Amino acid sequence: MNIWEVILAFVVVVLMLVALLANVLVLMCFLYSADIRKQVPGLFILNLTFCNLLMTVSNMPLTLAGIIYKSQPGGDEICHIVGFLETFLTTNSMLSMAALSIDRWIAVVFPLSYHSKMRYRDAALILSYTWLHSVSFPIVAASLSWVGFHHLYASCTLYNKRPEDRTQFVIFTGVFHTLSFLLSLIVLCFTYLKVLKVARFHCKRIDVITMQTLVLLVDIHPSVRERCLEEQKRRRQRATKKISTFIGTFILCFAPYVITRLVELSSVVHINSHWGIISKCLAYSKVVSDPFVYSLLRHQYRKTWKDIINKILKRSSINSSALTSESHNQNILQLNE
């Protein structure tokens, strides 16, 4: 292994550990908090977490083995199963993010009718569609033997070994990425830009009320006035930062890999193997960022996982104090004897 391969292997190990820890923590929050389970977006987050965890324990270890040994890890059957899962889980994750954006759009743009438009039944129907949509492509690929170990990405993924099927595989790959990556990106951009528009409108209304109040309160202290103006500025930037994070992480993590897969179909352009693995690692990094972007940094999840940690620490503290007390009593008995 050269230095680049050592670095890439180390990156995959770090991504696996962080992804496993973060997604398990999201799952614990979901199971611990009844309030989170009651919310409709919790179903989409649970589905996204399920996909991320399965990707972490199935695909990432084989990619790591592919980088280290520079060959297909395991037999053909294992590779076909993992390649099937990679295609299914990636598509399902993208569509889950699109479903979350639709949920936010309805909640912000149609707040009064949100509970009638987005019920558990509606969320279950959306999830059913995402699973049906996601599983259709790997089924077609597996039936046509277009799943295998790809040396460029050191992964079991979509791969055509037969030159006579090149045209069909090019069409299939183009349709697949159009109806997974591009479709999800269009939904994300449309819904979140609508949300941003409504958020800015409300910010302007609040700003007008704030300025009118500051004008009326002539005796207000300058420091209070400055804090109000700073909060006004932060309020305008908050929605923009959140939406930029949602769309930006999606593009940054998935676009390099998708573009590489499409460019690879052209026999004219040569792609460096290191770049192929880097683009794969970028796609894996979405598994790491999703728990923080959609869950753990939100107030409700922060409160829940802090409660879980405090409960664990309190229980361990009680156990340790009980053990200390027990050992102290035993020492006293031994001295009395």
Image (cartoon, grey):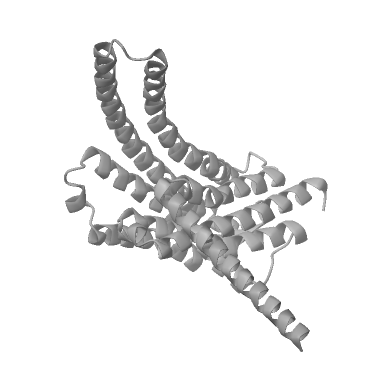
At a point 30% along the width and 56% down the height, the residue shown is 40
Q: Is residue 242 above or below residue 138?
A: above
Q: Is residue 161 visible?
A: no
Q: Name the residue furthest right.
A: 2
At a point 53% along the width and 59% down the height, the residue shown is 309
* Nearest the eye: 260 or 22: 22
- Compared across the picture, whether 11 is left or right of 245 comes to right
Where is residue 308 drawn, in percent x and y? 49, 60
Q: Is residue 142 above or below residue 218?
A: below
For the C terminus, the image quarter is: bottom right
At a point 46% along the width and 50% down the height, the residue shown is 302
* Nearest the eye: 81 or 209: 209
Q: Is residue 39 visible?
A: yes
Q: Name the residue furthest front.
A: 336
- Compared across the picture, whether 201 is left or right of 10 comes to left
Q: Is residue 101 above or below residue 237?
A: below
- Compared across the picture, whether 210 is left or right of 226 comes to left
* Nearest the eye: 214 or 165: 214
Number of numbered discs visible in the structure rendering: 0
* Nearest the eye: 145 or 182: 182
Quarter-wise, where is residue 239 in the image? top left
Where is residue 228 drawn, in percent x and y? 37, 21
At a point 23% along the width and 57% down the height, the residue shown is 119
Where is residue 242 drawn, in percent x and y? 42, 36
Where is residue 180 drawn, in percent x and y? 42, 50
